[in-house]
Amino acid sequence: MSTGVSLSLLLKRKSTVKEGMSNSREMIDVANEKIDRLEEAISKLEQSIETLVDIQENVENYETTKSKWEGTREKEFEGKYNSYNIYLKKYCSDTDKAKELLEEALESAKTDRNNAQIGLGNLQTVLNGLESDIALARARG
């Protein structure tokens, strides 16, 4: 304990540290909730991407045959088919970008949680020191 630090000042510091710890715990809870939501969203998006890839493969592997399509109908179908394939590829690309953004947000939330956990640990160390100082101040009376 520093010389001349009063018991009331130590108790006030302890209160401030406990308040900081409470805020850190709240930040950790918020980060954990955000992490859970992001992990769930990423999982659902991955499932959707898998389904989309299957659809895209089916579209790319579809063949037009002369026995089914002839003349104008064949050209009309090929035009729509090619257009659909282009839009499907763009949608796949956009979906992959969305997943990347979610993954970046997830990493950011994990970093925020880790920083709050480190802060909480540091505050716990400060609190332990203050409690020792308070015990000494009380013993000195």
Image (spheres, helix red, strand yellow):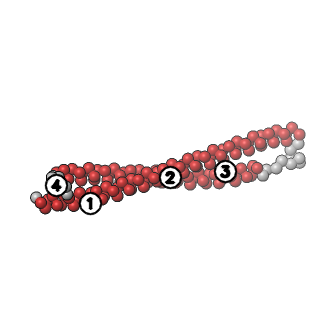
Where, by quadrant of the figure, is residue 130 drawn? bottom left
Total labels: the figure holds: 4
Q: Which residue is mark 4?
A: 3
- Residue 33 in sight in this render: no
Q: Position of residue 54 (x, y in %)?
A: 70, 53
- Residue 52 badge: 3
Report how far apart the C-alphas of labels 4 and 2 lie in the structure.
Answer: 45 Å
Q: Do callouts 3 and 1 mark residues in contact (Cβ within 8 Å)?
A: no
Frontmost of labels 3 and 1 is 1
Circle 2: residue type: Glu
Report how far apart the C-alphas of labels 3 and 1 lie in the structure.
Answer: 55 Å
Residue drawn where x is 60% and y is 53% of the image:
46
- Residue 21 in sight in this render: yes
Q: Earlier in the sequence, mark 4 or mark 1?
A: 4
* Circle 1: element type: helix
* Circle 3: element type: helix
Circle 4: residue type: Thr
* Circle 4: element type: loop
